[in-house]
Image (tube, grey):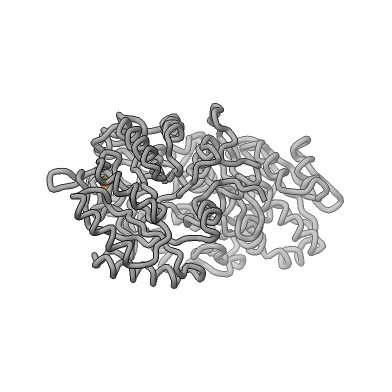
């Protein structure tokens, strides 16, 4: 398989024949830039990025012992293959004799194969350079330089107190000394955009660095930025505005992956990639609160690069076009979904795209029971998306010997093309999607699907039509509130047969509140891929197998949590609906209705 990214672990394997493991060590040197009068760089945690197991400051030999124990417990092939990793604070700060003594203590504490130390670009004097160069003759030594950005305005804003020229100088000095170096770049610094990241990557790649480390900006609890965040911050759709001074760009996991891929493609393939994500204890991160674990982010990045046949360095020197890509994502049941850049959400849960259709929609439909009463069912599918719900229902109903007439509503025509790319051209699903794309209609002897494109709120359905089942599968309430309002749901409920049911993945109290206020009985469906199940609502109490608990009913009816979204004109934008909802909740709170019912 083609190597898509030139990772540090690949470099190590080629160079030493096996992996090496970092043993983090804190020399206790502190940082020249951080003292009682200066908080240092605005994002820097009080502990200067100390490793988790070093939270108790230990003697150097003890740190090495603990670090080796930790690594050996985690990796079976780590015995004797260690990197002395001096990452905390500024590891070239101090008197040369003191530094020599500390480095020698480190290197005599275990049989290290490599030494790696991080520092500021303006903290490399002739004496330390000469010493590092000497050390490099007996143990391969790498120096990691905190660059962050090549934009001097940003460097000043984040209080780095050095400019990019310092980086150019540091890189030149290390090259001259024959010492390998890597550059640490941060993505998402205040006020920066894609053009800044591209500029920084290009500027850094033009210097003599062997490695590049990229990571997203984190707002950490015990940093200067974190303290400001806690006192005054406003989260907008695109940024976090802190104190009206720092505007931190906001991107979710998929936007970050997309951005990383673009940057990797302009990094020459011989540059070693040291890291691609930030590392901090979850409890210390104030922002962003991502839900996808780090390994999954990397797994998704690899699968997208593989799928699109992209590689590090394949666009060096070319202009990066900004595109709104639909990222293809492999979910846990091996089916694929896409990330929709307009709604900034996936079409399906990463727990399983097809499984979600089956467990959150088709299973709660209780098809065997319905088909025992009548052999032909009608289904309204709100949010066709990639078609998983409609296609799965159609298959299951046909397997049970029934027939189904499906009406699907979809805003975005392009989702059909995406959906088709997920199936073999010879498959039934592909043919159905092809027919829907060409004629907005598919039918065979046992089933039919009618596709209505456009805003579901204004879709014109035959006035006589009634449905046994309605699947409500819009994007989330925060991204697509238009399809979660009381007004829209009331319209849907009027399309149900008396025994019909509306089924949705949503467990939102506001949505359940809308069903209840339409006079429906409401229950939960079996959970899949998360703690809470979805929702089923019907005018027939018998249809609801697991009614909402008394506590949930109280939350919905006696607190503002269950206040439905409103859109009486059925024309409001997502933002208008959310703002209106916020205002209504504030009013209710002033009238004494609690936020939550305990
Ligand atoms: S130079 Fe490094 S250690 Fe010093 S304040 Fe900045 S981030 Fe923290």
Q: Find residue 332 and report its image quarter.
A: bottom right
* Residue drawn at (65%, 47%) of the image: 2
Q: Position of residue 8 (x, y in %)?
A: 49, 51
In this view, the residue in front, 194 or 490, is: 194
Look at the picture and state if 518 lies above or below 151: below
Return the residue found at the far left. Answer: 37
Return the residue found at the far right. Answer: 445
**Labels in figure, total:** 0
In this view, the residue in front, 246 or 406, is: 246
Task: Specify whether residue 487 is in view.
Answer: no
Look at the picture and state if 568 lies above or below 292: above
Q: Position of residue 259 (x, y in %)?
A: 50, 39
Task: Specify whether residue 5 is in view.
Answer: yes
496 left or right, relative to 151: right
* Residue drawn at (68%, 56%) of the image: 468
In this view, the residue in front, 413 or 538, is: 413
* Residue drawn at (54%, 28%) of the image: 317
Q: Position of residue 349 (x, y in %)?
A: 56, 55
65 left or right, relative to 207: left
Q: Looking at the rendering, in which quadrant would you find the C terminus?
A: bottom left
276 left or right, relative to 241: right
Q: Position of residue 231 (x, y in %)?
A: 22, 46
């Amino acid at each position: 398989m083609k190597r898509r990214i030139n990772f540090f672990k690949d470099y190590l394997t080629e160079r030493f024949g096996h992996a090496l493991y970092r043993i983090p060590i804190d020399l206790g040197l502190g940082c020249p830039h951080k003292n009682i009068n200066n908080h240092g760089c605005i994002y820097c945690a009080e502990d200067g990025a100390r490793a988790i197991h070093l939270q108790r400051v230990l003697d150097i030999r003890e740190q090495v012992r603990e670090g080796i124990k930790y690594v050996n417990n985690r990796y079976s092939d780590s015995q004797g293959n260690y990197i002395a990793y001096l990452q905390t604070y500024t590891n070239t700060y101090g008197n040369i004799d003191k530094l020599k003594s500390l480095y020698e203590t480190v290197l005599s504490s275990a049989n290290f194969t490599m030494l790696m130390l991080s520092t500021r670009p303006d903290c490399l004097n002739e004496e330390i350079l000469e010493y590092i160069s000497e050390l490099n003759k007996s143990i391969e030594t790498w120096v990691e330089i905190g660059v962050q950005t090549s934009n001097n305005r940003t460097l000043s804003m984040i209080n780095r107190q050095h400019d990019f020229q310092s980086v150019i100088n540091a890189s030149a000095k290390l090259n001259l000394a024959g010492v390998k170096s890597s550059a640490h770049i941060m993505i998402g610094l205040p006020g920066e955009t894609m053009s800044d990241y591209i500029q920084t990557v290009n500027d850094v790649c033009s210097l003599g660095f062997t490695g590049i480390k990229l990571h997203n900006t984190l707002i950490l609890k015990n940093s200067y930025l974190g303290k400001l965040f806690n006192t005054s911050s406003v989260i907008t759709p695109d940024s976090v505005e802190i104190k009206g001074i720092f505007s931190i760009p906001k991107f979710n996991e998929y936007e970050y992956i997309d951005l990383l891929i673009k940057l990797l493609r302009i990094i020459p393939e011989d540059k070693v990639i040291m890291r691609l994500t930030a590392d901090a204890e979850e409890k210390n991160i104030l922002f962003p609160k991502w839900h996808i674990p780090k390994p999954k982010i990397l797994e998704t990045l690899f699968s997208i690069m593989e799928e699109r046949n992209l590689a590090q360095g394949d666009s060096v020197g070319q202009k990066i076009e900004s595109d709104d890509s639909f990222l293809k994502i492999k979910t846990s049941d091996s089916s694929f979904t896409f990330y929709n850049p307009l709604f900034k959400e996936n079409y399906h849960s990463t727990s399983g795209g097809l499984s979600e259709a089956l467990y959150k929609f088709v299973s709660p439909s209780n098809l065997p029971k319905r088909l025992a009463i009548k052999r032909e069912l009608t289904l309204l599918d709100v949010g066709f998306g990639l078609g998983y719900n409609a296609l799965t229902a159609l298959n299951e109903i046909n397997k049970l010997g029934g027939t189904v007439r499906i009406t699907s509503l979809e805003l975005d025509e392009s989702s059909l093309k995406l959906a088709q790319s997920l199936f073999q051209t010879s498959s039934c699903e592909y043919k159905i999607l092809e027919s829907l794309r060409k004629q907005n209609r598919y039918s065979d002897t046992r089933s039919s699907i009618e596709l209505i494109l456009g805003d579901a709120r204004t879709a014109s359905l035959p006035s006589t039509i009634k449905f046994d089942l309605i699947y409500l599968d819009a994007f989330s309430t925060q991204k697509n509130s238009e399809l979660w309002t009381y007004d829209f749901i009331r319209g849907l409920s009027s399309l149900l047969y008396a025994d019909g049911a509306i089924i949705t993945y949503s467990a939102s109290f506001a949505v359940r509140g809308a069903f209840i206020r339409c006079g429906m009985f409401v229950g939960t469906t079996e959970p899949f891929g998360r703690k809470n199940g979805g929702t089923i609502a019907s005018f027939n109490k018998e249809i609801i197998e697991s009614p909402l608990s008394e506590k949930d009913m109280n939350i919905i009816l006696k607190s503002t949590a269950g206040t439905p979204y409103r859109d009486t004109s059925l024309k409001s934008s997502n933002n208008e609906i959310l703002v209106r909802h916020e205002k209504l909740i504030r009013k209710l709170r002033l009238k004494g209705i609690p936020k939550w019912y305990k």
